[in-house]
């Protein structure tokens, strides 16, 4: 059968159309990220791991880390290696720009320190670079498992955790470095720089998160939260208790320090110092009402210098968790008994001294029974300093905020 | 006419079939060619030795050889090998650590202790891992040049050795608690670790290298580096200070001693070596307050000598305030007036030397001691720049009662 030429031409043109419209299909396997074109597999990781990585690098050498990641994934490279390789590739891409922002290292002797301050503009530019780098890393690699595992960010949706952690880490490192550099004597310009960075940190967080999320995260990552968290390490606080302690302590920490022996910012007038003391008392009283008598007493106890040390020691030694509390109970009983003896008008001074010696001996035995020989030995540097003072005829008073066993007053003069 | 039309149709048909062939060929060729972004065809790819087992379960040494036979940059090779080594040790490390408590809220701390035996086993594991890192990764190209004369591979081995031991010692000594109470077994373990580290170091370095390493990393050198702000010791001065301090030091470090500040006779041999002027600079450089002033002056872009000038005003205030308080020829009122004048002059002097910006940073802090002088105290600064108890004036006699 003869096909007319016109029909054959029509058929051929139709085939032309079909062939023109036909697109090559992507390779099978893991779909590449939307922004990266599908890439062919030159060497498979399963067949030749080193060859697959080298081929991916070679083929994407001019195309940047995004293409590198796509090729590594297409070749079947495990994600943890993709992360390591792409992070190194991104670091390499930014290295020259970062180096240009830092002052060239000085040729120093090994006993000399380089204390050249980094200009603020360089700090800001470095911060921008870090942010740019982090954005690129998240865009290519997705959330960092380390940020995922950090409970501080657990309340955020997974995709927001790493960006938020990066902002907090970058700004906090920069702020810490600025504060450290100012050695407690910030210039007016440095105060402005610190305020600027704090505001910028807040703005960047607000861009990345919702306003409720920012407020919550600011609370979680604030220096006060870190301090309160440390203090309440052995307190087992409920959410409400933590909030109450946080509120009181952040208000107290915000007060100017008046300790003349420390890095005081200001010297308060006697009137201002009295007002501050009254405000502090009011805040603590509010906290007491909020926690209740018993828990407030526990809070005061866990804040004391030795409490976390005894708790930590007893946990390491496998003693019951309430050991630290029992040691503090014993400590308070010793103090009360020593005061009772010292103020006992029915006995003379020699009898008082003898009674204090007996108290030291019985207390030493009680402590040994409570802690066992090993822990007693570890704790003896502290406990013996108290017991020896009792043996020397001293009695002991612990104030609400005293931090050790050392506040020992001499006996009143012999009557 | 029909013939001409027939010829035209034949030509068109031929062209169309040829186009079909071209399109068909191009389609196949497109499927076989990688995307044009990276134009791979022009680049030959080296064929590394096969390392077919999945990384993490294979011998990282073979993987390192395979990677190094390619043209992959060294930094990438290091990153992938480091990840491989981490993976190789991950499970063995995990069994030595207590399981993570995933029920903790963000404000709660995991207080589960790591047993001492696990700590020591972790150290052994980390040492094994570090040795493998040195073997496979070699020296770190990004490590800062510390001027050490050690060959780069040894430098890396020593760095990792110090890091492994420091981490373990810190975990036992502190574990997040300052001034931890140590159990007898922990004290014994720390002493043993010190010896073990020495032995490992001695096996790694020649005696000359070991001596140089100890000099560079000793606590005395660290003190000189961290605390002698701007002293810029010469080679001879450093050696003199180091040797003197090594002989004198009873473990208290620079600031546990009175060398800088009061006990002239202790420091006399050093003074003889450094000379009066450099010795005075040495003592001033070690003063905490001077370090702060020096940093402020540097950051404010003032001439470096300003720091010493401001510091000298402070020294003058100390000497002069004590002299006034002790001057029996003055009445209480005269002493108070003289002390207040001294405080005013010191404030003004500091302001003039530092200029408005740096003075705004320093004076509120200096008010801690200036205000005491204003109130009638003599001032005595202690070794770390802190305020002493001062020598207070006796209280003025009560004013005579006004007649009613």
Image (cartoon, rainbow, N blue to C red):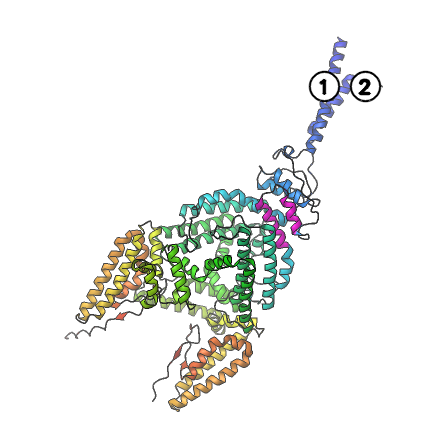
Quick check: B196 above or below B13?
below
Label 2 environment density (alpha carbons within 10 Å; few <14, some 14–19, many ≥20): few
Quick check: B118 above or below A111?
below
| Relative image position of residue A62 (x, y in whole percent) | 57, 37
Q: Secondary structure at mark 2?
A: loop
Query: Are both tags, 1 and 2, on one chain?
Result: no
| Relative image position of residue B159 (x, y in whole percent) | 53, 56
Label 1 environment density (alpha carbons within 10 Å; few <14, some 14–19, many ≥20): some
The magenta segment is: B60-87
Q: Main secondary structure of the magenta part?
A: helix
Picture quadrant where residue B283 is located: bottom left
Whether A187 is among the magenta residues is: no
Q: Which mark is residue A336?
A: none
Q: Which residue is mark 1?
A: B15
**Residue closer to the observer: B88 or B195:** B195
Q: Which residue is mark 2?
A: A3
**Cα–Cα gap, marks 1 and 2:** 17 Å
| Relative image position of residue B80 (x, y in whole percent) | 61, 48
Q: Secondary structure at mark 1?
A: helix
């Amino acid at each position: 059968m003869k096909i007319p030429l016109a029909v054959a031409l029509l058929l051929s043109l139709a085939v032309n159309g079909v062939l023109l419209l036909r697109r090559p299909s992507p390779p099978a396997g893991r779909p590449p990220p939307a922004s990266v074109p599908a890439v062919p597999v030159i060497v498979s990781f399963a067949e030749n791991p080193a060859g697959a990585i080298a081929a991916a690098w070679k083929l994407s050498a001019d195309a940047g880390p995004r293409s590198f990641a796509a090729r590594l994934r297409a070749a079947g490279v495990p994600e943890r290696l993709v992360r390591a390789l792409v992070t190194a590739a991104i670091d390499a891409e930014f290295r020259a720009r970062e180096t240009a922002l830092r002052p060239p290292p000085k040729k120093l002797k090994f006993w000399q320190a380089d204390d050249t301050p980094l200009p603020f503009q360089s700090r800001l530019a470095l911060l921008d670079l870090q942010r740019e780098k982090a954005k690129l890393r998240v865009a290519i690699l997705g959330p960092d498992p380390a940020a995922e595992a950090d409970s501080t960010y657990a309340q955020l949706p997974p995709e927001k955790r790493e960006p938020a952690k990066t902002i907090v880490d970058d700004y906090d490192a920069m702020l810490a470095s600025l504060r450290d550099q100012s050695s407690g004597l910030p210039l007016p310009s440095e105060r402005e720089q610190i305020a600027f960075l704090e505001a910028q940190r807040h703005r960047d967080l607000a861009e990345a998160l919702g306003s409720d999320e920012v407020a919550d995260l600011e609370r979680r990552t604030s220096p006060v939260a870190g301090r309160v968290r440390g203090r309440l390490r052995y307190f087992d606080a409920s959410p409400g208790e933590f909030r109450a302690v946080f509120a009181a302590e952040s208000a107290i920490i915000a007060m100017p320090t008046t300790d003349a022996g420390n890095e005081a910012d200001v010297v308060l007038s006697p009137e201002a110092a009295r007002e501050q003391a009254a405000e502090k008392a009011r805040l603590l009283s509010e906290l007491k009402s909020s926690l209740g008598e018993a828990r407030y007493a526990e809070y005061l106890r866990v804040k004391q210098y030795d409490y976390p040390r005894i708790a930590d020691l007893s946990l390491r030694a496998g003693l019951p968790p309430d050991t630290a509390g029992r040691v503090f109970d014993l400590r308070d009983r010793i103090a009360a008994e020593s005061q009772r003896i010292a103020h006992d008008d029915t006995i003379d001074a020699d009898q008082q001294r003898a009674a204090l010696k007996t108290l030291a001996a019985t207390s030493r035995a009680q402590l040994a029974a409570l802690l066992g020989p090993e822990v007693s030995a570890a704790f003896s540097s502290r406990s013996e300093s108290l017991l020896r003072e009792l043996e020397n005829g001293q009695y002991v008073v612990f104030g609400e905020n005293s931090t050790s066993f050392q506040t020992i007053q001499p006996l009143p003069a012999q009557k | 006419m029909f013939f001409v039309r027939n010829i035209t149709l034949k030509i068109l048909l031929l062209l169309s079939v040829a186009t079909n062939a071209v399109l068909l060929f191009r389609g196949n060729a497109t499927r076989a060619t990688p995307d044009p972004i990276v134009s791979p065809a022009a680049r030959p790819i080296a064929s590394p030795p096969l390392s077919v087992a999945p990384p993490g379960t294979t011998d990282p040494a073979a993987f390192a050889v395979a990677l190094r036979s390619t043209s992959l940059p060294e930094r990438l090779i290091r990153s992938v090998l480091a990840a491989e080594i981490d993976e190789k040790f991950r499970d063995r490390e995990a069994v030595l650590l207590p399981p993570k408590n995933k029920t903790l809220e963000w404000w709660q701390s995991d207080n589960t202790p790591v047993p001492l035996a696990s700590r020591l086993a972790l150290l052994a594991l980390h040492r094994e891992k570090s040795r493998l890192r040195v073997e496979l990764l070699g020296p770190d190209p990004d490590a800062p040049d510390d001027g050490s004369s050690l060959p780069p591979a040894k430098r890396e081995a020593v760095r990792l050795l110090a890091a492994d031991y420091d981490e373990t010692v810190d975990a036992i000594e502190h574990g997040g608690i300052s001034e931890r109470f140590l159990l007898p077994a922990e004290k014994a373990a720390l002493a043993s670790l010190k010896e073990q580290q020495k032995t490992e170091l001695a096996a790694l370095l020649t005696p000359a290298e070991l001596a140089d390493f100890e000099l560079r990393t000793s606590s005395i050198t660290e003190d000189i580096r961290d605390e002698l702000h701007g002293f810029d010791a010469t080679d001879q001065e450093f050696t003199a200070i180091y040797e003197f301090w090594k002989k004198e030091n009873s473990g208290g470090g620079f600031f546990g001693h009175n060398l800088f500040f009061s006990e002239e006779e202790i420091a006399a041999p050093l003074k003889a070596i450094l000379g009066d002027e450099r010795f005075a600079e040495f003592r001033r450089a070690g003063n905490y307050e001077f370090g702060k002033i020096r940093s402020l002056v540097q950051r404010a872009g003032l001439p470096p000598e300003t720091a010493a000038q401001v510091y000298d005003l402070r020294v003058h205030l100390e000497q002069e305030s004590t002299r006034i308080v002790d001057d029996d020829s003055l009445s209480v009122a005269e002493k108070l007036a003289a002390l207040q004048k001294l405080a005013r002059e010191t404030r003004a002097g500091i302001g003039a030397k530092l200029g408005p910006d740096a003075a705004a940073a320093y004076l509120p802090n200096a008010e801690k001691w200036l205000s005491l002088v204003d109130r009638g105290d003599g001032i005595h600064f202690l070794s770390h720049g802190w305020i002493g108890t001062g020598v207070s004036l006796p209280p003025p006699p009560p004013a005579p009662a006004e007649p009613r």
